[in-house]
Amino acid sequence: MKLILLGAPGAGKGTVANMLSDIDGSVQISTGDILRAAVKEGTELGKQAQSYMNAGDLVPDELIMGIMKERLKEDDCKNGYLLDGFPRTIPQAEQLKIMLEEMGEQLDAVVDLAVPREVIMDRLTTRRTCTQCNAIYNVKSKPPKFEGVCDECGGPVVQRDDETEEAIASRLDTYNEKTAPLAGFYEKEGMLMRINATSSDDVVAAIKEKCGLA
Ligand code: AP5
């Protein structure tokens, strides 16, 4: 399966990508996770990305395209991929289109996860993430078995640095201005699937049906 998952911060892109990856083995590629790992390791990319991320702004397109041009050529992408958080601007989508044409590849669908703003604010302030394996939790709907400890790898489960109320508001504004127009871009390409994403199970069922998965 080759999918793009669109949606506001907290719409559930990471959660849905994770569930789909378990079902058909497509690799989940989250530009947010790649950037957070770079920040944690203190690489040059991490140093350049950190201030944008903490302020809730987008990292410049050139940095993101540099990452994705290499990432999509890796062997694990041959079985399919779930793009979580990429593309996020029209220039990224245009460059991805050229890249896929050059690679002779086609996407199965672009899924736009629609969730009301008040649900998003609630989800993001209650989300917790494992800093080691990126597993996603929620103190209300999906807490880890032991507080602060990842069920999957035993790593620390914490709140992300961009989860302050100020950064969340800025991320939502950035999404509305720069990322929401991608739905129109992919609608014109005839690839857009809009899904009410209040329940992740419904989203996964709808995508499985569209992509012909059992
Ligand atoms: P990124 O990590 O991609 O953040 P985001 O898009 O803001 O998305 P989130 O990870 O916050 O949310 P999500 O939709 O994955 O929701 P989740 O599944 O966790 O990017 C971070 C930053 O990196 C950006 O701000 C930017 O600076 C930079 N960046 C990344 N990619 C970039 C790019 N391409 N270009 C430029 N800059 C880039 O779910 C949220 C919570 O809700 C969880 O607690 C979960 O358990 C819960 N939940 C999910 N679904 C449900 C449900 N159905 N019912 C109940 N709870 C649910």
Image: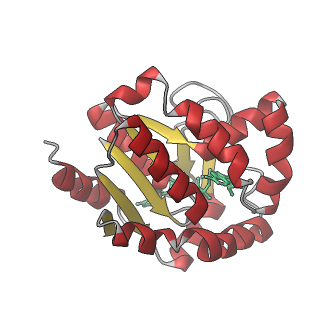
Quarter of the displayed picture in which ligand 1 can be seen: bottom right
| Residue 149 on image: x %, y % | 62, 33
The picture quadrant where one finds residue 169 is bottom right
Q: Residue at x 29, y 41 (%)?
A: 1
Rendered residue at 54%/67% (across/down): 8
Residue 88 in the figure: left or right of residue 38: left
Q: Is residue 13 left or right of residue 37?
A: left
Taking depth in this image into account, of 90 and 84 the one nearest to the observer is: 90
* Relative side of 43 to 24, left or right: right
Q: Residue at x 68, y 71 (%)?
A: 174
Which residue is found at the position 36% from the left and 58% from the top? 110
Q: Residue furthest top?
A: 75
| Colour scheme in use | secondary structure
Asked where in the image residue 46 lies, by quadrant, the reply is top right
On-image quarter of the C terminus: top left
Q: Is residue 9 visible?
A: no
Above/below status of 106 relative to 22 = below
Pick the front one: 143 or 78:
78
Residue 74 x, y percent position in the rendering: 49, 24
| Of 198 and 63, the residue lying toward us | 63
Q: How many marks?
A: 0
Give the percent coordinates (x, y) of residue 10: 55, 61
Q: Is residue 201 visible?
A: yes
Q: Position of residue 6 (x, y in %)?
A: 46, 61
